[in-house]
Image: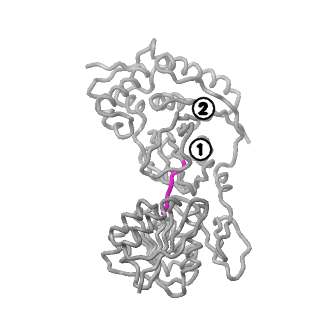
């Protein structure tokens, strides 16, 4: 079919728990996307990942039809999991909540690489380190 | 109905994830990220136009804790801004809506050609006995009937479908064209798409419209059709020009019976001559054009 894209929307939402309320409703309804169709399909495909944030990237075509892919969890989620901390620092300038090794940073960068705007793994690692700093997590060699 | 506070930030690609992460802590079920600024009206799937900025958006209930939530978000943004410029949040209240149904306002019954009527499944319409009525639930396959390329194909079908013919629908999407052809009397329709979701949707839509028996749908490409050696009275291809042209170089014309007809849609006005030249190379003779806005469909025949 002669598909032309009119919008791409990313929803960073809880696996298995999508519902038509904001932000999903307003983000998709404005483009004529079959909302319950998306919600059911997303929940079915993420049912085994409850507790994770699984972003969905939705490509919306000119006639309102759509398709979506699941992306890797946000960097911050992977960092918290790797560092074993429940949440990042409220004020990361004054507070440190945990640490990661450079090897762990590399592993996270590898998971996220395809979803990042990074030319190589080194650049991706820099972005992950930036997120670490922002969360009050120090990176050690 | 309640109200929501919508919080929005315009940020660059590097800041988007950090901002989304922070907003997520305060917002209902997560955040959305959209492209902002000047974007093309539409683009091909394999193109990646760069947005001027990204819009990160979240919502929280406009209740007695709303002021406190706003204060917390602003505080977090102060810290973020010390490390990387992310700008300030904009806040405004929005009314709760029935979002589960709000999207449906984009779809209305459409009349096309002489007697084709496409109706969204949830809307009942008055029909005439000779109407070709297609009911559809828009979803994950292209072909909701609202796009000019689909509409042009449907009008073309009205001109070329004869009772009893067999047909190939190459790139069937939602199955809308196959369903229309079946309702006009085509008997043996082979609907293929490289996307398995499209195949599933076509089968469901065909059954819902009572023409499941006339339509066989399978995942496949032009190569797969050529391998079967089958030829058809009518071939309908609603794909973009840049896909149709290489298909022509790959014996697309062989799928049409000698003396048979073909319809090509998904062409922008200035691509038509190039597509017609490609059609001639694969043994087809273009004989008519249909146009709606800058979209064109070409009708062609294979000499007997």
Q: Chain of mark 2?
A: B
Q: Chain of mark 1?
A: A
- SS at badge 2: strand
**Who is closer to the viewer here, A96 or B167?**
B167
Percent of width and height locating residue B87: 56, 23
Residue B85 in the figure: left or right of residue B257? right
> Which secondary structure class fits the magenta region best?
loop
Q: CA distance from mark 2 to mark 1?
A: 12 Å
* Pointer 2 and pointer 1 on the same chain: no
**Who is closer to the viewer here, A20 or B142?**
B142
Q: Residue at x 58, y 53 (%)?
A: A33
Q: Which residue is mark 1?
A: A27
Q: Which mark is residue B227?
A: none
Q: Is residue B79 on the magenta stretch? A: no
Crowd band around label 1 with a 10 angstrom C-alpha radius: few (<14), some (14–19), many (20+): many
- SS at badge 1: helix
Residue B133 in the figure: left or right of residue B43? right
Q: Residue at x 43, y 70 (%)?
A: B170
* Residue A47 visible in rendering: no
Q: In which quadrant of the rendered image does the C terminus of chain A lie?
A: top left
Q: How many marks?
A: 2
Percent of width and height locating residue B14: 44, 29
Q: Which residues are magenta?
A: A1-6
Q: Residue at x 62, y 25 (%)?
A: B69
Q: Which residue is mark 2?
A: B8
**Who is closer to the viewer here, B64 or B302?**
B302
């Amino acid at each position: 079919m002669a598909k032309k894209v009119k919008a791409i929307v990313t929803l960073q939402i809880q696996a298995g728990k999508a519902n038509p309320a904001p932000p999903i409703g307003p983000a998709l309804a404005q483009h004529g996307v079959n909302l319950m169709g998306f919600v059911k399909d997303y929940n079915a495909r993420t049912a085994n990942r409850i507790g994770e944030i699984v972003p969905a990237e939705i490509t919306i075509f000119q006639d309102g039809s759509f398709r979506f892919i699941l992306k890797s969890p946000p960097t911050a989620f992977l960092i918290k999991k790797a560092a074993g901390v429940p949440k990042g620092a409220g004020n990361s300038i004054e507070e440190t909540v945990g640490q990661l090794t450079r090897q762990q940073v590399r592993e996270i960068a590898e998971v996220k690489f395809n979803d990042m705007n990074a030319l190589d793994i080194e650049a991706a690692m820099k972005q992950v380190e930036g997120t670490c700093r922002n969360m009050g997590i120090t990176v050690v060699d | 109905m309640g109200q929501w506070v919508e919080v929005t930030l315009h940020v660059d690609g590097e800041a988007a994830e950090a901002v989304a992460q922070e907003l997520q802590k305060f917002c209902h079920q997560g955040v959305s990220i959209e492209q902002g600024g000047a974007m093309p009206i539409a683009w091909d799937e394999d193109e990646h136009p760069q947005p001027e900025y990204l819009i990160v958006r979240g919502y929280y209930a406009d209740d007695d804790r709303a002021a406190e939530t706003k204060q917390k978000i602003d505080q977090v943004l102060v810290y973020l801004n010390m490390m990387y410029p992310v700008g300030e949040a904009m806040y405004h209240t929005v009314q709760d809506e029935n979002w589960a149904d709000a999207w449906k306002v984009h779809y209305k019954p459409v009349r096309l050609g002489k007697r084709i009527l496409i109706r969204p499944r949830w809307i009942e319409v008055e029909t005439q006995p000779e109407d070709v009525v297609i009911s559809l639930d828009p979803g994950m396959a292209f072909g909701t009937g609202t796009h000019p390329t689909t509409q042009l194909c449907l009008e073309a079908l009205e001109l070329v479908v004869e009772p009893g013919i067999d047909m190939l629908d190459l790139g069937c999407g939602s199955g809308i064209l196959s369903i229309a052809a079946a309702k006009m009397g085509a008997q043996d329709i082979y609907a293929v798409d490289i996307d398995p979701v499209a195949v599933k949707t076509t089968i469901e839509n065909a059954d819902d419209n009572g023409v499941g028996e006339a339509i066989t749908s399978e995942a496949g490409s032009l190569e797969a059709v050529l391998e079967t050696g089958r030829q058809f009275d009518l071939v309908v291809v609603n794909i973009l020009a840049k896909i149709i042209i290489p298909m022509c170089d790959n014996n697309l014309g062989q799928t049409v019976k000698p003396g048979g007809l073909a319809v090509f849609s998904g062409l922008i006005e200035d691509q038509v001559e190039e597509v017609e030249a490609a059609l001639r190379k694969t043994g087809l003779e273009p004989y008519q054009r249909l146009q709606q806005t800058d979209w064109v469909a070409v009708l062609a025949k294979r000499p007997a």
